[in-house]
């Protein structure tokens, strides 16, 4: 993999070429990476892949006119051609009064070490053996597990670098490792489920005994699922699916949706949008965090910030461009959110099931039925029917519906069973009332 100094040299070449072409400002970002991916099924190797990726993105400005180009070739001629293409586009583009680099005062001055780079020295043979053993654990948990849908071991390392004509240049190395096991059980009908572990450092992955056992337990628990009649009930979202409630929030408070007036969070700053006990914050500099980054896609320093406190929305998520469009201040979120945390409560999932007493525990969802303009929410779901604070039986082929603004205000509790495998970290979420559409 190219060293950081090599990538920063390439960025300087881009900026020099842009100047010579007459650009008034320019920026470049580079991503490179390599990885190993192994998939087995029923004890046999199915897929083995070695990945090598690289890409260069160039953006130039001719005054208020912007042009962009990309390349997977880092040779001097390819760089020159890419910059020339971007400049040609800019010369023929319409002027945009909001176009341009972020103001220099927002650029990251220091780039802290966030402990994101942990290469996993695993060979294809070792990865295959690990995947086979993990699948074997799951398959031998119960004779009703009749088939497997693949077990994956994936290891990837990369480097990200960014620079612009304000004199900013920086980057960081990163890694990501995954073990993912999915099996199929049969008892009066087949069901499929699984479990995965993901981490920056392979030593932080759950052990294969745990992954295999959880994959088996979750699959077996779905057997003999029933349907439900339409009703209004409390709904408890298990932590791995609860994160989607907050990814919808992130989309709605992101600058692009706001300046296009295509968001149900328009004009909601300093308004109560959640239940009072809800605290949502971003902490981009957590060591080993899956969403950690020292600066955003504009080169702006990331920082911890409250997004929702006491249920009140305090900030939007803005890049330099969207901030200018909205006449607001950039927030360090060009490219998205970095480690969104929903502050946990004191109860685990079982305690939340007991406190719900009667309702639906959702463990899996399908479809993307969220209207970002109105907040209307409708998704296919499966999980467990709960009565007297106990899971009674698995359920499937149901739809849960509501409006996100109402759902956010009706959050009764957040669990302490935080799922830390992604860049949105939340425990299970209990919502007071939703429509359940069934038979």
Image (cartoon, grey):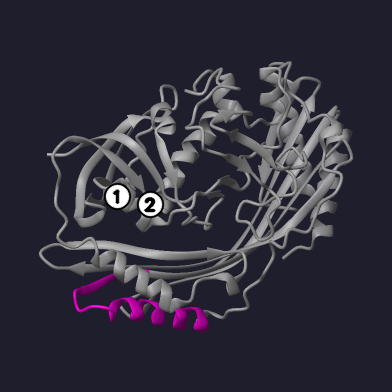
| Residue located 57% across and 46% down the image | 341
Quarter of the image for the N terminus: give it.
bottom right
Residue that mark 1 sits on: 361
Q: If you read the primary sequence from the N terminus, does the residue marked by circle 1 or circle 2 appear first?
A: 2
Q: Is residue 266 left or right of residue 42?
A: right
Q: Is residue 49 visible?
A: no
Tell me where residue 327 appears, x and y as whole percent: 71, 17
Front residue of 360 and 132 = 360
| Residue located 73% across and 39% down the image | 58
Residue 335 occupies which quadrant of the picture?
Answer: top right
CB atoms of marks 1 and 2 within 8 Å: yes
Q: Which mark is residue 238?
A: 2
Q: Is residue 71 visible?
A: yes
Above or below 207: residue 436: above
Residue 152 among those drawn in magenta: no
Q: CA distance from mark 1 to mark 2?
A: 7 Å
Quarter of the image for the C terminus: give it.
top left
Tell me where residue 270 appears, x and y as whole percent: 60, 22
Magenta segment: 125-150
Tell me where residue 436 appears, x and y as whole percent: 23, 37
Q: Is residue 437 left or right of residue 373?
A: left
| Dot 2: element | loop
| Residue located 62% across and 51% down the image | 291
Front residue of 125 and 416 = 416
| Dot 1: element | strand
Tell me where residue 308 appears, x and y as whole percent: 58, 34
Front residue of 259 and 407 = 407
């Amino acid at each position: 993999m190219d060293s950081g100094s090599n990538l920063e040299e390439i960025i300087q070449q881009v900026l020099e070429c842009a100047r010579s072409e007459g650009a008034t400002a320019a920026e470049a970002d580079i991503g490179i990476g390599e990885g190993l991916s192994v998939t087995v099924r029923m004890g046999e190797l199915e897929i083995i892949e070695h990945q090598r990726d690289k890409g260069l993105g160039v953006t130039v400005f001719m005054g208020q006119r912007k042009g962009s180009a990309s390349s997977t070739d880092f040779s001097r001629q390819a760089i020159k051609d890419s910059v020339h293409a971007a400049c040609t586009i800019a010369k023929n583009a319409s002027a945009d009064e909001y176009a341009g680099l972020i103001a220099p005062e927002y650029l990251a001055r220091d780039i802290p070490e966030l402990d994101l780079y942990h290469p996993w020295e695993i060979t294809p043979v070792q990865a295959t053996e690990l995947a086979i053993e993990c699948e074997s654990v799951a398959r031998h948990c119960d004779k009703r597990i009749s088939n497997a849908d693949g077990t994956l071991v994936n290891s990837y390392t990369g480097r990200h670098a960014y620079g612009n004509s304000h004199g900013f240049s920086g980057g960081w190395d990163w890694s990501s490792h995954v073990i993912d096991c999915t099996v199929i059980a049969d008892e009066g009908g087949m069901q499929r489920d699984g479990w995965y572990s993901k981490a920056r450092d392979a030593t932080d992955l759950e052990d294969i005994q745990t992954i295999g056992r959880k994959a088996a337990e979750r699959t077996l628990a779905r057997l003999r699922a029933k349907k439900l009649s339409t009703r209004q009930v409390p709904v408890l979202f298990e932590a791995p699916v609860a994160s989607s409630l907050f990814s919808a929030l992130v989309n709605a408070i992101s600058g692009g949706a706001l300046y296009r007036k295509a968001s149900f969070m328009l004009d909601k700053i300093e308004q109560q949008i959640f239940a009072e006990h809800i605290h949502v914050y971003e902490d981009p500099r957590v060591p080993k965090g899956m969403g950690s980054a020292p600066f955003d896609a504009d080169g702006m320093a990331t920082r911890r910030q409250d997004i929702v406190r006491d249920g009140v929305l305090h900030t939007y998520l803005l890049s330099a461009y969207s901030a200018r469009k909205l006449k607001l201040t950039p927030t360090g979120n060009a490219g998205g959110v970095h480690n969104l945390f929903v502050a946990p409560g004191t109860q685990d999932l079982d305690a939340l099931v007991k406190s719900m007493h009667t309702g639906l525990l959702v463990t899996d969802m399908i479809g993307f039925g969220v209207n970002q303009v109105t907040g209307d929410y409708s998704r296919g779901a499966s999980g467990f029917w709960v009565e007297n604070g106990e899971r009674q039986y698995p359920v499937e082929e149901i739809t849960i519906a509501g409006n996100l603004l109402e759902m956010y205000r009706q959050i009764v509790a957040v669990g302490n069973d935080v799922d830390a495998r992604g860049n949105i970290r939340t425990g299970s979420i209990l919502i007071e009332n939703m429509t359940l559409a069934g038979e």
